[in-house]
């Protein structure tokens, strides 16, 4: 039989209803069997191993307790250690792999079913067999094993992207003029080389990032590095794709005069621009969905790798169960990275009003003694009062070194922790100290007294550190009281300089949601931000040429993304220099930068990738706030483009 004729028959067969029903049923059984087999393999208890390991685990825990009691620097009793073990168990069981794998299996099954009903089951199967053969051949040789991983990943991601793209085409099959324009955008994206090239670059980037991870490092750092580089890198490549393609789809139609045929039909200018934006956002949705699925599944793959102190996932070096007595690396990964936490920042102890007044009056009397003429100067009195308040505020965040009197300490309070107390899950104290020079080789010895319990710690200057806490440290009012010593009064260890906490560098974090739901909200935020880029590119292309529209959009994107850094820099870049004289250089720079800061301050506050990497909650309220804020910018930008577009003479009759 002719090969071409056989392929045609197979193509017709895969589009029949009977074939789709049968293959869909087989695909469902295959996915359900694979998922059920994984659940049985991972979660089914082994009776003999459980009996053999139970005594050893108990003896190891008892040994660790005895060692902790004997250590003079650890003021912790047996009950406290047992509580920490139970807290660790709750943290690990709260972050089970079952929901993540179930979500991944459901998505894979849905994508496969969509491919089947699009009439592409045999096509995808054939391409999959060819890709599997190529990757198997490349993986045989050590020199090409990394290439095999990249090829396999790119092919798999491209197949998913193609399936999502086909779903978009079906979704945009409506008869409205807006949907017709959106369909043309999809067709244009398939033709333009820049669009396809940047799309492949996204898939290649996502496939290559895992190869850059240090396999010998801590597992939590590998997971954080993968999330950081994969998600942020994907966003910037997708933003570049959006920038160029959204500008091209409007500017090129004006340049090539194909827009004459479009607007002579019953399509209003607003329908044209909205259709363009919907089409671009559909492409971004397909791309981000593919990336999200790839990042999510590979993160779960990394989670199943051995952490530091484990022979394999959740099995310690001594053979004990990693869920019962987790290694520090595993515990931090589960409770501080693959989670969704909220934080409450510390507030220093309030200084009584009478003490403040006494300090101000004492300072004024010292100044009046030097210069009695200042007694009648009200402005001088206000300046001294402001200076004293500033010094007192800075002293509240600083802990002086030990003196002849003894060790100095400062009390801090964490409020608003009622929900954390109700949940009863472990908390995390996060802190970062600074001292003279911030020499990273200097180790500071500290003592935290939290709810009456001393917790010694060692810290590197200007680096973030964490301490696990129990929910029982919160009192009935939802408050944690903590006293910080500059040094360790128990062991007598001292530090040479005053240490200080910058505002925001001392906080208590607690779980407030699931990692899976948080991941979805992060990807939605990134999609919303891409919508702003698309709106600026489309709006500017209504009256600018393609290069100028791309340049303007790039400038707006750069200004919006760097507003946070610029605002921080402007706090040090004032109108006056250190001598108090007017600075003719700094003043115009500040005046020119402030409008951009005021305009994009809200946009710059949307940092979903940083929240994902740090295990912080992106709440539904913050997502809705981002939709409202960025959505307002999108409407304003497209509205401005519509006002300009409807007044332009796009087709002028020449008389020939």
Image: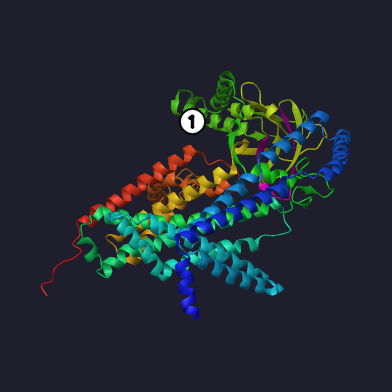
Question: Disc 1 designates what residue?
Answer: 383
Give the main secondary structure of the magenta stretch: strand
Quadrant of the frame with the C terminus: bottom left
Residue 301 appears in the figure: yes
The colour style of the image is rainbow
What residue appears at the point 29 percent right and 62 percent down from the top-left corner?
A: 544
Side (left or right) of 173 relative to 380: left
Most foreground residue, 495 or 207: 207
* Number of residues whose C-alpha sits closer than 10 Å to that of mark 1, classed few (under 14), some (14–19) or many (20 or more): few
Vertical side of 442 occupied by 133: above or below:
below
Residue 112 appears in the figure: no
Q: Residue furthest top?
A: 354
Most foreground residue, 338 or 228: 338
Vertical side of 292 occupied by 353: above or below:
above
Vertical side of 5 occupied by 388: above or below:
above
Magenta-span inclusion, residue 432: yes
Residue 29's spot in the image, x, y percent? 59, 53
Side (left or right) of 482 relative to 61: left
Choose top left, top right, bottom left or bottom right for residue 556.
bottom left
Highlighted range, magenta: 426-450
Most foreground residue, 217 or 58: 58
Residue 484's spot in the image, x, y percent? 70, 32
């Amino acid at each position: 039989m002719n090969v071409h004729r056989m392929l045609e028959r197979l193509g017709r067969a895969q589009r029949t209803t009977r074939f789709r029903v049968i293959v869909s049923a087989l695909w469902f059984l295959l996915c359900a069997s694979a998922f059920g087999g994984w659940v049985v393999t991972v979660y089914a208890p082994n009776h003999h191993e459980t009996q053999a390991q139970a005594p050893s685990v108990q003896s190891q825990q008892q040994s660790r307790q005895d060692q902790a009691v004997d250590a003079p620097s650890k003021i912790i009793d047996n009950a406290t250690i047992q509580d920490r073990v139970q807290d660790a168990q709750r943290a690990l069981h709260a972050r089970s792999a079952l929901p993540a794998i179930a979500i991944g299996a459901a998505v894979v099954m849905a994508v496969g079913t969509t491919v089947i009903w699009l009439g592409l089951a045999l096509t995808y199967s054939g391409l999959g067999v060819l890709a599997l053969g190529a990757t198997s051949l490349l993986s045989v040789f050590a020199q090409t094993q990394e290439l095999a991983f990249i090829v396999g990943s790119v092919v798999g991601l491209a197949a998913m992207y193609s399936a999502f793209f086909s779903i978009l085409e079906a979704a945009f099959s409506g008869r409205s003029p807006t949907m017709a324009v959106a369909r043309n955008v999809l067709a244009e994206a398939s033709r333009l080389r820049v669009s396809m090239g940047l799309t492949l670059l996204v898939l290649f980037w996502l496939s290559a990032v895992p190869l850059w991870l240090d396999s010998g490092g801590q597992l939590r750092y590998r997971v954080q590095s993968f999330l950081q580089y994969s998600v942020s890198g994907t966003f910037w490549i997708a933003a570049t794709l959006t920038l160029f393609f959204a500008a091209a789809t409007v500017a090129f139609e004006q340049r090539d005069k194909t827009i004459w045929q479009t607007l002579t039909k019953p399509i209003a200018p607003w329908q044209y621009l909205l259709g363009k934006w919907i089409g671009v956002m559909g492409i971004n949705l397909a791309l981000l969905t593919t990336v999200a699925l790839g990042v999510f599944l590979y993160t779960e793959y990394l989670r199943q790798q051995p952490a530091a102190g484990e022979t394999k996932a959740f099995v310690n070096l001594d053979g004990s169960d990693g869920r019962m007595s987790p290694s520090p690396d595993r515990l931090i990964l589960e409770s501080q990275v693959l989670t969704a936490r909220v934080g409450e920042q510390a507030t220093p102890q309030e200084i009584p009003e009478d003490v403040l007044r006494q300090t101000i009056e004492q300072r004024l009397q010292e100044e009046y003694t030097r210069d009695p003429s200042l007694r009648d100067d009200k402005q001088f009195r206000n300046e001294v009062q402001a200076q004293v308040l500033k010094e007192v505020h800075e002293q509240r965040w600083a802990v002086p070194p030990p003196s002849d009197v003894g060790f100095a300490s400062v009390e801090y309070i964490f409020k608003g922790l009622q929900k954390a107390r109700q949940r009863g899950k472990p908390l995390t104290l996060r802190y970062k100290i600074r001292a003279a020079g911030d020499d990273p080789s200097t180790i500071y010895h500290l003592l935290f007294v939290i709810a009456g319990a001393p917790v010694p710690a060692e810290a590197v200057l200007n680096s973030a550190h964490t301490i696990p806490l129990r929910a029982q440290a919160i009192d009935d009012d939802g408050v944690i009281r903590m006293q910080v010593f500059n040094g360790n009064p128990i062991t007598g260890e001292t530090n040479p300089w005053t240490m200080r906490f910058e505002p925001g560098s001392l906080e208590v974090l607690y779980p407030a949601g699931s990692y899976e739901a948080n991941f979805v909200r992060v990807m939605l935020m990134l999609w919303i931000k891409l919508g702003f880029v698309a709106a600026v590119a489309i709006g500017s292309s209504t009256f600018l040429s393609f290069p100028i529209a791309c340049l303007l959009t790039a400038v707006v994107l750069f200004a919006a993304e760097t507003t946070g850094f610029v605002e921080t820099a402007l706090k040090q870049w004032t109108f006056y220099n250190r001598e108090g004289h007017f600075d003719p250089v700094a003043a115009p720079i500040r005046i020119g930068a402030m409008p951009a800061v005021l305009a994009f301050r809200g946009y710059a506050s949307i940092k979903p990738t940083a929240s994902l990497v740090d295990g912080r909650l992106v709440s539904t309220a913050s997502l809705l706030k981002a939709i409202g804020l960025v959505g307002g910018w999108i409407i304003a930008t497209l509205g401005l483009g519509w006002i300009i577009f409807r007044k332009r003479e796009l087709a002028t009759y020449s008389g020939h």
